[in-house]
Amino acid sequence: MSRIVSWFSCGAASAVATKLMPSAIPAYCETGAEHPDNMRFMADCERWFNRPVERLKSDTYADTWDVWERTRWLAGINGARCTVELKVAPRLAWQRPDDIHVFGYTADGPDSDRAIRLRANFPELTIVTPLIERGITKAACLDMVQRAGIKLPPLYALGFQNNNCLPCVKATSPAYWALIREHFPDKFDRMAKLSRELDVRLCRINDVRSFIDEIPLTQSTSHPTQPACDFLCLIAEQEYTA
């Protein structure tokens, strides 16, 4: 029989998607650049899922910094090298041709378009998007996780839209990098130095590619997504509480 694999990222959306697929194997690609609280969140989710999370890790690279410094590549038009080495490669080595893949794309924002592109770019994969199918938004996922008694990862409260690696070189928003500078100054300084060294302008200031150390100190930062639930997430909750 085909396996159902839910790609858990230690984010609220992938947690709810995994919970809605009780027969799925939760799988997590470790990048070595996660917030340390992710391990607590994963343990809480494992109890919520009532099954362990399969952890996948690169045999070649220790973390994102190891990838960037050894390959001398951050991000470009073909994406980020760290994603390829730390997420795609371990996933391809572990997955099976007949796996059914569950992704936690939400029904709002750019996620619907991302799901469409994923299916178009990988037609050989069987892909399930339970949150889109149920009309569940990102804010609703945050609420559903908290209502399950699980404390959210701290990055959400700090203003980050996703619980991604620290830092994420795919981010081009000055607001994102201003948040990194505010809350993780050592990581910001290290990336500012490396990006200068590699001549990579990671952000856009007034739609012009710029180095992150050119971001004004007065740069505003984004606000956290506020939990907000409606009848759609209540219906979804009935599925896993029945």
Image: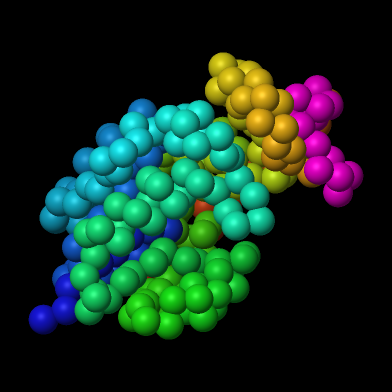
User: Residue shown at 70%/36% (left/top)?
Assistant: 200
Question: Is residue 212 located in the magenta-colored stretch of the structure?
Answer: yes
Residue 112 lies within the magenta run:
no
Measuring from the top left, give residue 167's x and y in whole percent. 54, 34
Q: Nearer the viewer, residue 157 or 188?
A: 188
Q: How many marks?
A: 0
Query: Is 139 above or below relative to 56?
Result: below
The answer to whether one can see residue 83 in this image is yes
Question: Relative to 84, is 193 on the left or the right?
Answer: right
In this picture, is 211 found above or below 108? above
Q: Residue at x 64, y 50 (%)?
A: 76
Residue 42 appears at what percent x and percent y?
A: 27, 43
Residue 169, quarter of the rendered image: top right
Q: Is 18 left or right of 121, judged from the image as shown?
A: left
The residue sitting at 81% across, 27% down in the picture is: 214
Looking at the image, residue 240 lies above or below residue 189: below
| Residue 35 screen position, x and y as percent | 41, 32
Residue extent of the magenta highlight: 205-217
